[in-house]
Image: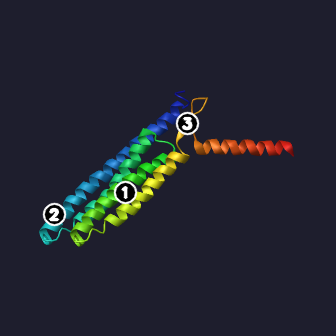
Amino acid sequence: MYNGFSEESLKRIAQQKVNFRLSVKIHVGIYIIVSILLLAINLLFTPLILWVLYPFFGWLIGVMMHSVAYVVYAKGVYPMAKRGIIFHYTAYIFVNLMLVIINYFTYPIFYWVIFPALFWGAALIIHTIAYFIYYRGKISQEGSGVSRRERAIEKELEKMKKRMKQK
């Protein structure tokens, strides 16, 4: 037994990490090969229009989300709410990067990209504040982390038990 895990369960977790890492490497490799091919096609047939930037950055969002999912899993980031914050920030950064590129090449006179960045940024701030209010853990007497939400659940459970005893 290793920290509550059997040898068999540790081996299963290690196998999942190796498989996940390999899938990320395959995704990145295919992204690079296809991007090189698309760039060659773009430069050979339509050198004056850089349409290749759209699939580059569009697919980069997927590659980054896949990579972040692996890192979060491999590092054992819990609770799921914390993973949600990490994914939200990653998506915000890479989608807005793509929108800046699109704005630059389609209508550079008007910076419309500011609006999704600001409004989504406000939602990201609200998401982060909600995480810190409801899911930020405090160390309990047993040494394990207990979030505000978990403490509220325990408190409600105690109330319900008292009511059951009174009846």
Q: Residue at x 40, y 46 (%)?
A: 70
Asked whether the beta carbons under mark 3 and mark 1 sit within 8 Å of each other, the answer is no
In depth, the one of 109 and 17 nearer the eye is 109
Which is in the foreground here, disc 3 or disc 1?
Answer: 3
In the rendered image, which residue does mark 2 sit on? 40
The amino acid marked with disc number 1 is Tyr
In the rendered image, which residue does mark 1 sit on? 92
Distance from the alpha carbon under mark 3 to that under mark 1: 28 Å
On the image, the x and y values in percent for residue 34 come to 24, 60
In depth, the one of 94 and 148 nearer the eye is 148
- Answer above or below: position of 100 versus 29: below
The amino acid marked with disc number 3 is Lys
**Residue 19 visible in the snapshot:** no
Q: Residue 165's quadrant in the figure?
A: top right
* Residue 138's disc number: 3
**Residue 76 visible in the snapshot:** yes
Location of the N terminus (image quadrant): top right
- Answer above or below: position of 18 versus 125: above
On the image, the x and y values in percent for residue 25 come to 31, 48
The amino acid marked with disc number 2 is Ala
